[in-house]
């Protein structure tokens, strides 16, 4: 079984180490010193450094971590073709998830998804790729995982996201409060069930938000139109 350890850096960025009994992989390793200390303390050998996407705040720790270990960087193309990274005989599964950027990847391990800037806890990423249709297919793909799937994102935007959720879906106050009560800044995680209850950007098929989009004169006839409409409210 693989374990996921989370590290905070740059105030709201989140880095990860996915570990087996002997080796580990670092994801978006901006928390360089903390990650290196963790590896030494836990007696893990870092085999690879990988990234959820190539925005500088997610790649800034690559060089430093690699220079202090024997780890090898696996780039987007290599990861997409390999479809997985071996960690002590277990597979960290790689899913291409374009939308925020064309090169976005999500990593899956033991009922957990490390989603980078694609699906946040409480919101979604900005569509910097410009391909809203690809982003729609990515979000619907992620929503196809079991309800208990844990979401580990690339930033902690929980408080800001829930404040915004209140402005566009005030009728959902109970779910938003429940979401905030479960929030731990020392370990930022949610489940897909939590997201479906409180995250307005995955709730584009709910009656409340369809009515909100309709009142603003936005197209709502299809799921893709409702996705585009909810993103206009971002």
Image: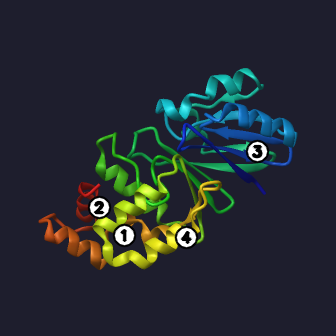
The reply, left or right, for residue 64 in relation to residue 125 is: right
Place of residue 90 in the rendered image (x, y in percent of width and height, measured from the top left)? 76, 51
The reply, left or right, for residue 97 in relation to residue 221 is: right
Upstream in sequence: badge 4 or badge 2: 4
Q: Give yes or no for contact between labels 1 and 4 (Cβ–Cβ under 8 Å).
A: no
Question: Label 1 belongs to which residue?
Answer: 203
For the point 40% across and 49% down, which residue is it? 125
- Mark nearer the viewer, 4 or 2: 4
Upstream in sequence: badge 3 or badge 2: 3
- Locate residue 67: give its quadrant: top right
Q: In the displayed structure, would residue 181 be above or below residue 158?
A: below
Q: Give yes or no for contact between labels 3 and 2 (Cβ–Cβ under 8 Å).
A: no
Q: Secondary structure at mark 3?
A: strand
Question: Label 2 belongs to which residue?
Answer: 227
Place of residue 171 in the rendered image (x, y in percent of width and height, measured from the top left)? 32, 78
- Mark nearer the viewer, 1 or 4: 4
Q: Which mark is residue 87?
A: 3
Q: In the displayed structure, would residue 17 be above or below residue 227?
A: above
Q: Give yes or no for contact between labels 1 and 2 (Cβ–Cβ under 8 Å).
A: no
Query: What is the C-alpha distance between the residues marked 3 and 2?
Result: 36 Å
The reply, left or right, for residue 47 in relation to residue 182 is: right
Identify which residue, 225 or 81, lies in the foreground. Answer: 225
Upstream in sequence: badge 3 or badge 4: 3
Identify which residue, 232 or 47, lies in the foreground. Answer: 232
């Amino acid at each position: 079984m693989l374990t996921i350890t989370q590290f905070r850096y740059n105030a709201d960025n989140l880095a990860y180490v996915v570990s087996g009994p002997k080796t580990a992989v670092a994801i978006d390793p901006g928390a360089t010193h903390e990650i290196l200390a963790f590896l030494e303390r836990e007696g893990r050998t870092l085999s690879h450094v990988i990234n959820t996407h190539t925005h500088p705040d997610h790649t800034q720790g690559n060089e430093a971590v690699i220079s202090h270990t024997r780890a090898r960087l696996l780039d987007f193309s290599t990861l997409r073709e390999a479809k997985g990274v071996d960690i002590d005989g277990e597979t960290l599964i790689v899913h291409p998830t374009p939308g925020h950027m064309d090169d976005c990847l999500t990593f899956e391990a033991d009922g957990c998804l490390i989603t980078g800037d694609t699906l946040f806890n409480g919101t979604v990423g900005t569509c910097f790729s410009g391909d809203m249709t690809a982003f729609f297919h990515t979000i619907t793909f992620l929503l196809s995982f079991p309800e208990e799937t844990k979401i580990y994102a690339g930033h902690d935007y929980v408080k800001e996201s829930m404040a915004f959720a209140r402005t566009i879906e005030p009728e959902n106050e109970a779910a938003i409060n429940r979401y905030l009560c479960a929030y731990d800044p020392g370990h930022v995680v949610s489940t897909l069930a939590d997201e479906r209850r409180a995250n307005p950007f995955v709730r584009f098929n709910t009656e409340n938000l369809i009515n909100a989009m309709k009142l603003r004169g936005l197209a709502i006839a299809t799921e893709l139109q409702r996705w585009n409409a909810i993103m206009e409210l971002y």
